[in-house]
Image: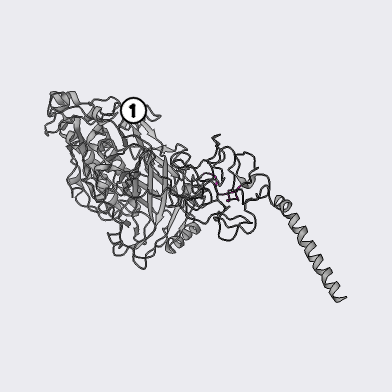
């Protein structure tokens, strides 16, 4: 696959070589892939003593398919000249190799248990049209719950019949028909109704966006001990020692990228790449460019990892080292039974695509979401096919018989990528796609995620209590929540929420119930932080319309002058004292919105009103920034003589000493009145 033998994603299918039928099977090889039965899904019972040997043989089957696909892709000219070449040179030799491997698997299992039946029938493979997905119901019949909307949003589908090439930078996808306009999709997300015993809480963990650049093409769950067992590259967050040869002990003592060091779990998924001609460090390596995974790796803009409860009952703790794979990396040829991909756009997350990449409008970001299995069999941390020890709850939230609910991991990954230019095959704006097994053609339905639970047991206990008690907890709490369903962003993918409705700040001298007027934040423009003064004069003071004592957005630093120029003047008939230097509170007797001085639970970011993480324009996408709440308590409005400054008012000069200086004449007068009263009483007694 180092050489691109295919045309672009939009080349026609009526005239060139790419449209010719080049195989005895009647399938165009330039748009063809290899379809082999998935042996691993059929091996639901493998004795523990045989697991290691069987896993290595299953990985060898994957390698055989990858090499056969590479041979097919390099043989376009021979296939064109000899229609039987694909069968004689690719398909039949692959069948022979698979038959030998399947026999070794049967022997390994027979050595310690009962010999599996019917494995020899899984040796034969066929060529499949790369633009034709398997029909519903084909492939495996266990795993993910069905997701609505799979057939919606067929933007670009009309081009499918004219595509004789597999497209993409390496010639094995994606193609224009793999994309759909998110606006053409109808809302299709339905959550089960919660009942009385529901566990309504959530626990978030913040582990970054793989800014450390930890990648490999291994898969320690499906192919332990096998280098390049995945044949595509993964992003890793959390545990920093995940590779094919890591033992449980290695994982337990590893470093972690998570903010809470009690979470050493491993979270990983296939990377997303732009098909822009870039040559990454893996361009000439297995799992990378030589297996059709080419282009620029895109670092996520935001990753949110949240554990949620069950709509019907309480959850129980996950066992340590529990392994879960969600989705099916081979679902393009296996069929969609185990597929669990969900693609959408910020602002449109009530619309989910299963078998298409989304075309997002300007200002909206691509979102891929994984909702992992949430029911556990109560005994095993893994299973032979890596699926049967966990299961999905049904549409009402019920676990299968014999399974118990566990916290459900919901993985939300956001990418700042533009909608590709399908009309020219991505030449103007490049196509994007997930890494995949080479024969899976980077189809979006093959998306999948992996998780290994390495939470500290005490922290796992806290998670369960939090979820069952209906609270929001964790180092990533209130970060990266979904935008309002159906909201269409215009310029920015994430909207800033309205200011909270709170009582305005009162001054010490003001009559009870009468608020001191403070300047209003400029309309249509977010409040700037004090560190970024604009040097513009502040608008004349107006009564606050939102009742927040200054019009600041939640999370902004509470400077009444919006961080710009000279401080606004309060009404002349109500002089207002300033707090003392360094005092982060208002003068005694004032009423003000409560502001916590401690860091928020999401690693220091002051949460937005509706729980959304800050996004564009100064956002803290991974929840690891400094607290915006420390030292930013709302202070009283400044006096007319207050000098221009950019720091929060709580840090400025002036304070109670100034107030005392203004009040001492009244105090002296009061003393004289009392003295006169005493003298008068003495005169009367005399």
Q: Quadrant of residue 592?
A: bottom right
Question: Which residue was labeled with disc 1?
Answer: 276
Where does the image place residue 620, in percent across and percent down from the top left? 48, 43
Q: Nearer the viewer, residue 648 or 619?
A: 648
Q: Does 165 lie within the magenta span?
A: no
Q: Secondary structure beneath disc 1?
A: loop
Where does the image place residue 184, in percent across and percent down from the top left? 24, 42
Looking at the rendered image, the quarter that the N terminus falls into is top left
- Rendered position, 166 above or below 585: above
Q: Which residues are magenta?
A: 625-637
Q: Nearer the viewer, residue 512 or 503?
A: 512
Name the residue: 41% across, 29% down: 281
Q: Does 627 lie within the magenta span?
A: yes
Q: Nearer the viewer, residue 213 or 163?
A: 163
Q: How many marks?
A: 1
- Rendered position, 632 above or below 466: above
Name the residue: 80% across, 62% down: 672
Neighbours of disc 1 within 10 Å: few (<14), some (14-19), many (20+) = some
Left or right placement of residue 444 versus residue 315 in this view: left
Magenta segment's dominant SS is loop
Where does the image place residue 42, in percent across and percent down from the top left? 24, 50
Left or right placement of residue 570 versus residue 553 in this view: right
């Amino acid at each position: 696959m180092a050489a691109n033998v295919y045309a672009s994603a939009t080349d026609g299918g009526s005239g060139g070589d790419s449209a010719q039928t080049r195989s005895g099977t009647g399938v165009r090889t330039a748009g063809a892939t290899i379809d082999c039965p998935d042996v691993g899904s059929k091996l639901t019972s493998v004795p523990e003593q045989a697991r290691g040997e069987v896993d290595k043989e299953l990985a060898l089957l994957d390698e055989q398919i990858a090499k056969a696909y590479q041979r097919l892709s390099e043989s376009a000219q021979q296939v064109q000249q000899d229609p039987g070449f694909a069968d004689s040179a690719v398909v039949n030799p692959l069948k022979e190799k698979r038959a030998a491997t399947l026999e070794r698997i049967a022997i390994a299992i027979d050595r310690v248990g009962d010999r599996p039946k019917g494995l020899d029938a899984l040796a034969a493979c066929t060529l499949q049209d790369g633009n034709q997905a398997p029909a519903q119901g084909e492939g495996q019949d266990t795993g993910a719950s069905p997701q609505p909307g799979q057939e919606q949003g067929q933007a670009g589908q009309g081009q499918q019949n004219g595509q004789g090439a597999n497209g993409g930078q390496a010639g094995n996808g994606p193609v224009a028909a793999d994309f759909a306009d998110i606006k053409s999709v109808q809302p299709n997300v339905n959550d089960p109704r919660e009942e009385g015993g529901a566990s309504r809480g959530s626990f978030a963990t913040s582990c970054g966006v793989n800014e450390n650049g930890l990648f490999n093409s291994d898969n320690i769950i499906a192919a332990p001990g096998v280098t390049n067992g995945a044949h595509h590259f993964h992003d890793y967050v959390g545990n920093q020692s995940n590779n094919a040869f890591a033992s449980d002990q290695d994982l337990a003592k590893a470093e972690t990228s998570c903010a809470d060091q009690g979470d050493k779990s491993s979270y990983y998924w296939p990377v997303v790449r732009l098909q822009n001609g870039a040559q990454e460090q893996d361009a000439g390596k297995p799992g990378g460019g030589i297996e059709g995974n080419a282009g620029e790796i895109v670092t996520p803009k935001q990753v949110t990892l949240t554990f949620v409860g069950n709509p019907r009952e309480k959850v129980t703790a996950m066992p340590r080292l529990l392994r879960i794979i969600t989705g099916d990396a081979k679902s393009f040829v296996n069929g969609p039974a185990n597929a669990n991909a969900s693609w959408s756009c910020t602002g449109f997350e009530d619309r989910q695509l299963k078998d298409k990449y989304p075309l997002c409008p300007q200002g909206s970001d691509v979102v891929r979401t994984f909702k992992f299995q949430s029911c556990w069999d109560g005994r095993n941390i893994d299973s032979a096919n890596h699926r049967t020890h966990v299961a999905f709850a049904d549409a009402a939230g019920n676990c299968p018989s014999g399974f118990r609910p566990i916290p459900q991991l919901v993985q939300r990954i956001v990418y700042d990528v533009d909608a590709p230019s399908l009309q020219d095959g991505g030449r103007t704006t490049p196509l994007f796609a997930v890494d995949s097994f080479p024969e899976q053609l980077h189809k979006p339905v093959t998306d999948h995620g992996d998780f290994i639970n390495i939470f500290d047991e005490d922290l796992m206990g806290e998670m369960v209590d939090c979820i069952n008690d209906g609270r929001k907890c964790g180092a990533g709490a209130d970060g990266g929540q979904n935008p309002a369903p159906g909201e269409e962003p215009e310029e920015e993918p994430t909207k800033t929420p309205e200011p909270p409705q709170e009582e305005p700040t009162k001054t010490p001298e003001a009559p009870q119930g009468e608020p001191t007027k403070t300047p209003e934040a400029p309309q249509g423009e977010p409040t700037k932080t004090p560190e970024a003064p604009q040097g513009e004069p502040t608008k004349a003071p107006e009564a606050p319309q939102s009742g927040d004592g200054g019009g600041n957005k939640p999370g902004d630093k509470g400077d009444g002058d919006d961080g710009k120029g000279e401080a606004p003047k309060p009404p002349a008939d109500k002089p207002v004292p300033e707090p003392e230097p360094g005092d982060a509170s208002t003068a005694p007797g004032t009423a003000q919105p409560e502001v916590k001085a401690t860091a928020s639970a999401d690693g220091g970011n002051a949460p937005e009103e509706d729980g959304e993480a800050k996004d564009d324009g100064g956002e803290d996408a991974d929840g690891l920034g400094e607290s915006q709440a420390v030292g930013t308590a709302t202070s009283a409005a400044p006096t007319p003589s207050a000098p221009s400054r950019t720091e929060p008012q709580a840090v400025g000069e002036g304070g109670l000493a100034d107030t005392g200086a203004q009040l001492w004449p009244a105090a002296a007068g009061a003393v004289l009145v009392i003295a006169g009263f005493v003298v008068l009483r003495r005169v009367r007694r005399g």
